Amino acid sequence: MKNIIETKQLTKAFKHETILENVSIHVQEHTIYGLLGPNGAGKSTLLKLLTGVFKANAGQIYYQEAPWQSKNLKEIGAMIEGPAIYPNLTARENLKVLATLLNIHPDKIEQVLQTVDLKNTGNKIARHFSLGMKQRLGIAMALLNDPKLLILDEPTNGLDPLGIQELRELIRSFPDQGISVILSSHILSEVQQIADTVGILHNGQLGYEDKNDKQEAHLEKLFMDIVKREGE
């Protein structure tokens, strides 16, 4: 199976602080890649590099086996550091604004609302949405351009157990729809339950990358070993 996106020796620094150092990840098509790491590990920075928000100091990003170009953003959907929604607009209105900006046919709005189960929100404005509804709206916005790659930064952060379960089932459905997913989280159990491949990031370095064997105890030991090793 080929990689939809990968990095080679990616490094990012701000002034004199190195945030990422020689990070090489490999995300296969039609799978869920779980990027696991504690807060401050560099996960959001890596995702911003993959979406062109930041530019790397060194290293390369490849999209579908060719050097990453800004035109690839047409095939990438992302929700990084929370959903970028207008609180005084309804779900449909939020999507209509984005569809207009991206020159996307309005028919797509109803499709993504159906996908994330927000079709029946009517005139309720986003400010009055639950946290889970806001997260699903953010995902709907990321799906609006029919992405081949969906990047989700801590999508279950702050949700109650029911909201986590609903969002987990939604994310699991994407590979069957032809969408590859990168999911970042600092929660071991979330990555263990949902990811096909796990990458563990700590102090800006990738300490581990391999298939997920779905064993939480194994993943926890790997994670703790990497944290201890990096701390020595």
Image (tube, helix red, strand yellow):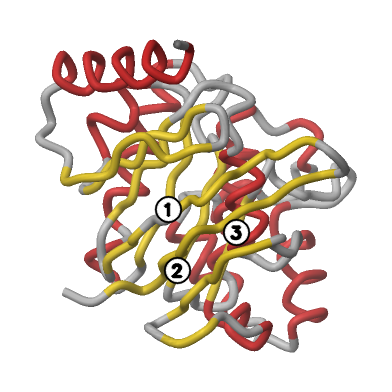
Q: Quadrant of residue 88?
A: top right
Q: Residue furthest front?
A: 232
Query: Please, what secondary structure does the residue beneath circle 3 have?
Result: strand
For the residues marked 3 and 1, what is the alpha-carbon distance in whole angstroms?
9 Å
Q: Which mark is residue 149?
A: 2
Query: Please, what secondary structure does the residue beneath circle 2 have?
Result: strand
Of residues 198 and 157, the one drawn nearer to the viewer in this rendering: 198
Q: Is residue 182 left or right of residue 11?
A: left
Q: Which mark is residue 78?
A: 3
Q: Which mark is residue 182?
A: 1
Q: Position of residue 64 (x, y in %)?
A: 39, 82
| Amino acid at the residue labelled 3 | Ala
Contact between marks 3 and 2 (CB within 8 A): the answer is no
Name which residue lies at 70% across and 39% down: 18
Query: Please, what secondary structure does the residue beneath circle 1 have?
Result: strand
Name which residue lies at 66% across and 46% down: 45
| Amino acid at the residue labelled 2 | Leu
Name which residue lies at 41% across and 27% down: 164
Q: Quadrant of residue 69?
A: bottom right
For the residues marked 3 and 2, what is the alpha-carbon distance in whole angstroms?
8 Å
Q: Nearer the viewer, mark 3 or mark 1?
A: 1
Q: Position of residue 229 (x, y in %)?
A: 37, 17
Quadrant location of the N terminus in the rendered image: bottom left
Of residues 54 and 175, the one drawn nearer to the viewer in this rendering: 54
